[in-house]
Image (spheres, grey):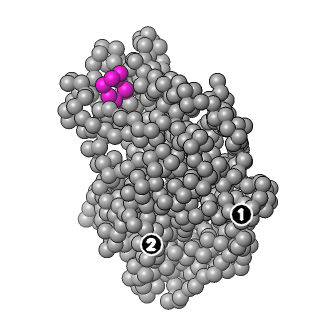
Amino acid sequence: MRITTLDDLQAVKAEGLRLTYPEKIKIMVGMATCGISAGGDKVYQTLADKIAELGLDVALEITGCIGFCQREPLVDVVYPDKGRLSYQRMTPDKAAALVEAIKENQIYPENLLCRFDREELLIDGQFKVYGNSHPAEWPAEVPLYQEVPFFKKQVKIALRNCGFINPERIEEYIGRGGYQALYKVLKEMTPEEVIATVKDSGIRGRGGAGFPTGLKWEFCYKNPGEVKYVICNADEGDPGAFMDRGILEGDPHAVLEGMAIGAYAVGAKEGYIYCRAEYPLALKRLEKAIQQAEDYGLLGDNIFGTDFSFRLKIREGAGAFVCGEETALIASIEGKVGEPRPRPPFPAQSGLWGKPTIINNVKTWSHIAPIIARGSQWYASLGTERSKGTTVFALVGKVVDAGLVEIPLGTTLREMIFDIGGGIAGNKEFKAVQTGGPSGGCIPAEYLDTPVEYETLGALGSIMGSGGMIVMDERDCMVNVAKYFLDFTKEESCGKCTPCREGTLRLMEILERITEGQGQLETIKDASLCGLGQTAPNPVLTTVKYFRDEYEAHITQKKCPAKVCKALITFRVDEEKCNGCGRCRLVCPVEAIVGAKKEVHRIIQEKCIKCGTCYDRCKFDAIIVE
């Protein structure tokens, strides 16, 4: 079927709603990368087998990541006209018991996380939850979605459909308002009006420096030329970052619709999605989404019966971090070595094959359709005066609940880490948070009440970046942390310009000397062709600024306060606490621990490789690190 009219679109929307909310019980399993790695595929197979064994008329579907990665595998049971129960940390055995309970028309009580009473559909696929519609027999202690701390302060726009639809079924995306914005643009708006709407919304690029999206589009629109391009930068390579992956795996059509709208606005007929090859599931779902959109006539020639045509192609990146920089990415698509080039000219002037090109990342593109559907004023009402809307973070590290989080800009770091993330795991003390990927800075506890905005993070020496947020606790050595991130940027430098190629190496040598007890008090500066080299020293500069005492301890006292740097620590046995159980001796990989059973053990320092295995395994706190 080819969709050309509003009636056609509404007919598919009705089918999508029927699939999303069928007139029978539906079970949904989180089958993004995080869910599968936690065992979601095994849970799904158990559910399928048990449903078949019992002959139940139950729909079983996959869905993307709802963001609560720490609680995967997640399984939801959707009851017709009633609501939905969400189960956490499911296992195959619990999945089988869940199906048995459904057969007996009972509520399965174990592993309940929350309930979604009902979703009120809006034109852009947003939803809100309201109460008093759940069956009386549902356990009262199971909180509503909006009462779960992890979700309570989130506002989902980019993630609006993730965890709610089958990402491999375009009808469900359309059922929640998908492609309505594209229809509106092609039937009711001029390119100038689209650009004005995006400009007025105040949205800034959700990666890098946060350049105003509408202004970038306007530059491209005003540059003459019959051929123009749009590109989606999905080359997500920051350590601990999975924001783009989560969206592509959970809601690929959000990106496709946004790109089609952007192409119409600037006058492009062709676009590319540059996605790293390390995301096989995202690539699979992207390919399927593009094919489905083409089958319905939502990509390709004469979309919605208009004279607008737009085609999308996928290009796989080979894992070079520097190709996340827009000019290096363009070079890679062109078949050249992925290296940055000087700017100007900017891609909006001369980009892919020398033609005007706009590049935005996954998160930016996924915001476009809701902005068009609900208007610029709605979007601009979210966030702060200088940073509008919402943004997506991968909240990871030493937090209780790691996951994918979407918050209005202006939310504080404290709210992110302690309210949404549940605080520091193991009741440890918060030490620092690193934002913006390997080029970001480390922010200490005294700035926890800082609102998350482009300017406020920049003032602290960090950046928003693409949306990584890594939390550290008292056990982390900040010198070692800076060394880790600098090692990453050193290895990922393309080597084209001397300041980056040599500067990151020299910085790394300095940090290696410090962590090995050979450091001297020095100062450093940088200059580089692209953002990788220009921002590579940020982790070093911020840790020196905020944790100078740790550097001085490494240099002057030859000690690592966090007891992490191997060259500066020693493991020994506390004779008063050791009862000779032999556990440490048995797990030592180099046989550096000696002692008879029920006698005090001893560590041979010459053989000890300081792996910490004995410390981790001792149940009596008899291993001391000095």
Instruction: State which quarter of the image contains the C terminus.
Output: bottom left
Magenta stretch: includes residue 418: no
Distance between the Cα atoms at labels 2 and 1? 30 Å
Figure disc tally: 2
Amino acid at dot 1: Asn
Q: Which residue is mark 2?
A: 455
x and y percentages locating residue 116 in the rendered image: 32, 34
Looking at the image, residue 249 sits to the left or right of residue 352; the answer is left
Q: From what the image shows, is residue 283 above or below residue 355? A: above
Q: From what the image shows, is residue 29 above or below residue 155? A: above
Amino acid at dot 2: Glu
Magenta stretch: includes residue 84: yes
Q: Given this view, does label 2 or label 1 mark the residue nearer the observer?
A: 1
Q: Say what secondary structure mark 2 lies in.
A: helix
Closer to the camera in the image, 51 or 511 = 51
- Snapshot quadrant of residue 312: top right
Q: Say what secondary structure mark 1 lies in.
A: loop
Instruction: State which quarter of the image contains the N terminus.
Output: top right
Looking at the image, residue 1 sits to the left or right of residue 110; the answer is right
x and y percentages locating residue 233 in the rendered image: 63, 55
Residue 31 visible within the image: no
Q: Which residues are magenta?
A: 77-86
Q: Are marks 2 and 1 in contact (CB under 8 Å)?
A: no
Using the image, tell me which numbered label, if any, was put on residue 223.
1
Using the image, tell me which numbered label, if any, was put on residue 293.
none
Q: From what the image shows, is residue 474 above or below residue 107? A: below
Closer to the camera in the image, 52 or 145 = 145
Sequence-first tag of 2 and 1: 1
